Image (tube, rainbow, N blue to C red):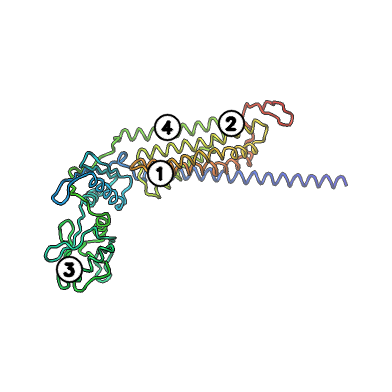
Amino acid sequence: MRIILRCSILTAKLKFEGRKFLVRTNSLIKLLICLVAIVALFVIFIRPLAHSIRQGLDLQGGTHVVLQAEDTEIALVDEDAMQRVVSIMEKRINELGLTEPIIQREGERRVIIELPGIKDPDKAIETIGKTAMLEFKDEAGNTLLTGTDLKDAQAAMNQQNGQCVVNLEFSDEGAQKFADATLENVGRQIAILLDGEILTNPVVREPILGGKAEISGQRDLQEAQQLAILLRSGALPVKVNIIETRTVGPSLGQDSKDKSEFAFVIGIAAVLIFMLLFYRLPGFIADISLMAYTLMLLGVLKGLDATLTLPGVAGIILSIGMAVDANVLIFEHFKEEFRLGKSIRLSMDAGFKRAFTTIFDSNITTIIAAGVLFLFGTGTIRGFAITLGLGVLLSMFTAITLTQFMLKLLVNAKVVESPSAYGADGFVLFDVATEKAVKK
């Protein structure tokens, strides 16, 4: 009986040890796969992603335009007119899909527009500089409708003849005006003019009561889309002339740009080395998570087709600092728990739980601040807010999930169980059971 009992105990121990070995092996394999995958992806994609993101005027240059408003017999320049000019310019540029533009007043009559990374500045200048005064006139030269009666304008292809056209939709008041105009001019021509030039001069064959019209004569769909943008954004309230146009290089200069990139690399390297020296294995895991964070942030910016400016770079650097700060909080709480005599695994779990509330609260307040900057800021300030907000969200994700996942795999693998490998060497531990201090 004793022999059988001993054999059963030995068999149970072997099975238990076998399960422990299997868990350690699986954890080690998973950890190695994560580490190799993140490092490989970082090495392969970091440079292509970094160079594929569009840069702002201060980093890569672009087009600089100066507009000046002038008095005419029809309209005089005043404060209200200039505010409307700036508003319409912002709307037109947003319609063109240009990101991170700078639109600002200079003096009483000038507006400065900076467009980063524009490949064809002539077309952009042509679009933003037009007055876009749309008129419908009868044969006697009387103005029947203007662009203020428009509700919408969209470029399209005419299904019958394949021509590129702009479909107009009038407001309720404009639709009634258009219906009356076509009713009174059946058999006559109604000319459609843009900035005094005739776009088309069709003959009214029957009254048009639906509140819609069509402008034909555009050479291609791109020209039709440009015209639709102008009409949707509205006519400028005063005459505006382009008095200066130039293509500018990086405002910081290529030398300063190179030094800024070098400083960025040095700063990141210093953060990685700091984490490795002070926190050993957990610091190494945090560094790997920081690589994953950088890839995710650049990928999101690329997906959003964002334009990166120097304030945007500052937002990224600040969010990296906050990502490391989250890991520091976790690891310091781990050390506190370890001082109480807990095991490495329990101390690590408690460190994450205790640090979560602090990390969550600090990051949420930063995200709120970034949201306020985005809502009320303009130009590069909004770029800073976007990179900071996205960076904080992603850094919180990597610190709470990815870092925690890999650290649990590391602890379960039990490759190294020495406290010094976890940055917890030389501590005086407090045994709760005996209420005595014990040197570890």
Vertical order, 250 against 133 (above or below): above
What amino acid type should be assigned to the residue bearing mark 2? Gly
Instruction: Tell me the element at label 3.
Output: loop
Q: Give amino acid for label 4.
A: Ile
- Label 4 residue SS: helix
Q: Which mark is residue 386?
A: 1
Residue shown at 62% from the left, 46% from the top: 26
| Sequence order check, earlier mark of 1 and 3 | 3
Residue 173 shown left or right of residue 9 in the figure: left
As shown in the figure, which amino acid type bears the numbered disc 3?
Pro
Name the quadrant containing residue 212: bottom left
The Cα atoms of the two marked residues, 4 and 3, are separated by: 67 Å
- Number of the label disc, if any, that sits on residue 322: none
Mark 4: few, some, or many residues within 10 Å (few <14, many ≥20)? few
Residue labelled with disc 2: 423
Residue farthest to the left, as pictured? 140
In terms of sequence position, does the residue under pointer 4 or pointer 3 come before the other? 3
Give the mark nearest the N terminus, 4 or 1. Answer: 4
Q: Is residue 408 left or right of residue 5?
A: left
SS type, badge 2: loop
Which numbered disc flags the more N-terminal residue, 2 or 1?
1
Q: Which residue is mark 4?
A: 266
Q: Secondary structure at mark 1?
A: helix
Q: Nearer the viewer, residue 290 or 281?
A: 290
> Which mark is nearer the camera, 4 or 3?
3
The answer to which quarter of the image holds residue 229 is bottom left
* Residue behind mark 3: 202
> Which of pointers 2 and 1 indicates the residue nearer the eye?
1
Mark 1 crowdedness (10 Å alpha carbons): few <14, some 14-19, many ≥20: many
Which amino acid type is shown beneath numbered disc 1? Ile
> CB under 8 Å between callouts 2 and 3?
no
